[in-house]
Amino acid sequence: MNCSADFIEISTNDSANFRIQQDSLRTFDFSSGFCKNIGRMMVPFQDRLYAEVLSMTDAVNAPGITTMILNHLSGGDPSSPMICKNLLPYFSDYATLKSLVEEATDAFEGKLVDDEIIVQQSGGVAPMTVDEEPSTDSVGQPSSSSDPLVLGSEPKSPLTQTNSDSAHTSPAIDSLPNRAPALFEAVTTAVAASLRQTFREESTAMLDRLLAIQREQSADGRAHDTVPTRRTRKPRKQTVTKPKERSKPAKEELLVIHPKFRRYLREKGVLPKYGEYLPRSVPAHIVASYEKDGCPRPDIDNVVLDWRVTGCRANSQWNKEALGLLTIDFINRLKADKEIEYDKDVMSYENIYEVCQDKLKRVFEVMKTISIDSMGNGAEKITRPAQTSAEKAHTRRNARRIGTFDRREKIIAQNAPNDTQMWDGIGNVLEELTADGMSGDETEDEVRPSSDTRKVKEVRRLRMPWINPSISELLHIVETYYPACTDATGAVHRGAPPFTRHSQAVKEDNRKAVKGLPRNWYRDDWFRSLSPVMKEWLAAGEDKPIPTLPEYVRGFASKR
């Protein structure tokens, strides 16, 4: 049996050795008859015994050894039905049967050697073999009618012998002429149960040993992985982190050139400021001639773009060439600039061209709202786009959400000396939620407060469907501690007080949930309703306890 991580295979070689190997690490040997008996469970009893003997000796001596075993166990009468009772203990335990056959084989071969010595000393008279009944002549002398059994002679199968020789060479077959079915069934049942149990025990022990070897190998591999040498660790860090630093240079290293690029584009007359006149657009017939004949071409000394296209990234050959001229000219200026160290990898043509597109994107957006053909030179001025009411409300809510986060941070800092451990835990919750985890709000009354209305603006909290209600309640109680500092010290908060905020939510906030929070900080039914993809995106961590805080009651600050 060859056992590896991928397959298990049972095989028997010529010598019937039963082997178990695992990646050439260890070899387990079983006796020869074990594997053979698995395939011979239903063979008649005496043939199975004969085959077991044959596996340990040659075909000449096997019949005599088999007969010796039968005579020994049956008290000299192999045809007796009592042989079933005598043989069952041996066949119910394979180790005992194997030992019996080995002892009988040794005894038989030793007797043959002794007989051969006697024959040589007596002048050629052969002794009686074990399978013959003693026969005497009229004077009582042993008869010499049978041929002697000699060790080392040519094998002669008992199944191919003639009828005349079978009485002397295959007594195992002839000694039981009447085979009782009950005998065969009882022996077969006992042997089958014993072999099954032996095979099961050996297989279980073998698999346990293989698993132990694999665990040792895995432990050794993890030990080598977790304790790397300093020499193998450093190159791996460099190969992983260096490409990341260069993946988006325009977001970091190109920031230093943005002010210079804006001034350059304004100098070329293609990027007006707010309140300035819009730049001229190249006439349509010139663009058509360029696309047809390739001339006239854009000129770097007088760059005019085609503002009729829907955007700077649109398929306009004129604009592509014009932006290319601007990019090359600006790169040449960077090379000659003494204030900036030129980096050919960061300040490449592709990166500068992308920055140029981003700078002119705002002008293209304004050009889409007016008619270029009806516009005269300097007829329109660029203005800031007006915000819609929804955009204004979104801006106000973002500002109030950030203000709520800052206010709660101050409340925690002011009350921390009273109970450092409790307020530190609440501060950790606020820190993990960040400003994005603060619930938004909407204006309760859209009428702006004024001297005529005498009404103070009020807001109502928007419910976040993803957050645990216990955290929402905790943050609401934190807000009640806003006047605690004034009550304790008499100090007055600077600035305008916060708007009156109603904690009873009516509408839901449709913003995304904050990623990476502990699992129990999310609302349980909301988390269970998520798809596997959304749960993976959310990347919830291990549970963390949610602190509790009693609500602050004014006038009892010293007793809380």
Image: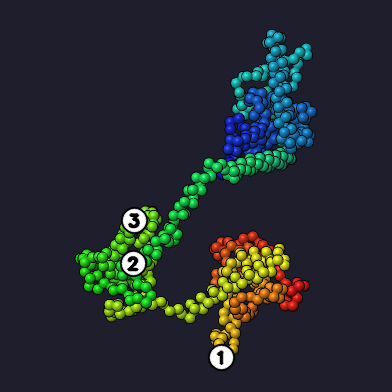
Relative image position of residue 414 (x, y in whole percent): 67, 69
Callout 1: SS:
loop
Residue farthest toward the bottom in the current orientation of the protein: 452
Asked where in the image residue 372 lies, by quadrant, the reply is: bottom left
Residue at 29% x, 62% y: name it: 325
Residue in the picture at 65% in, 65% down: 427
- Image quadrant in which you'd find residue 337: bottom left
Q: Where is residue 100 in the image (x, y as percent from the top left)?
A: 73, 29
Q: Is residue 320 visible?
A: no
What's the distance in space between the residues labelled 1 and 3, CA to CA? 63 Å
* Residue neighbourhood size for the residue with mark 2, other residues' Cα within 10 Å, grouped as few (<14), some (14–19), many (≥20): some
Answer with the quarter of the image where residue 249 lies: bottom left
Please state which amino acid type lies under the numbered disc 2: Leu
- 107 to the left or right of 509: right
Residue placed under numbered mark 2 in the picture: 265
Mark 3, residues whose alpha carbon is within 10 Å: few (<14), some, or many (≥20)? some
Mark toward the start of the polypeptide (1 vs 2): 2
Of labels 3 and 2, earlier in sequence is 2
**Amino acid type of disc 1?**
Asp
**Label 1 crowd bin: few (<14), some (14–19), many (20+), radius 10 Å:** few
Name the disc covering residue 452, or none.
Answer: 1
Distance of label 3 from label 2 (alpha carbons): 17 Å
Indicate the quadrant containing the N terminus: top left, top right, bottom left or bottom right. top right
Q: Is residue 396 visible?
A: yes
Q: Residue 335 carries which label?
A: 3
Q: Earlier in the sequence, mark 1 or mark 3?
A: 3
Q: Which amino acid does label 3 sit on?
A: Lys
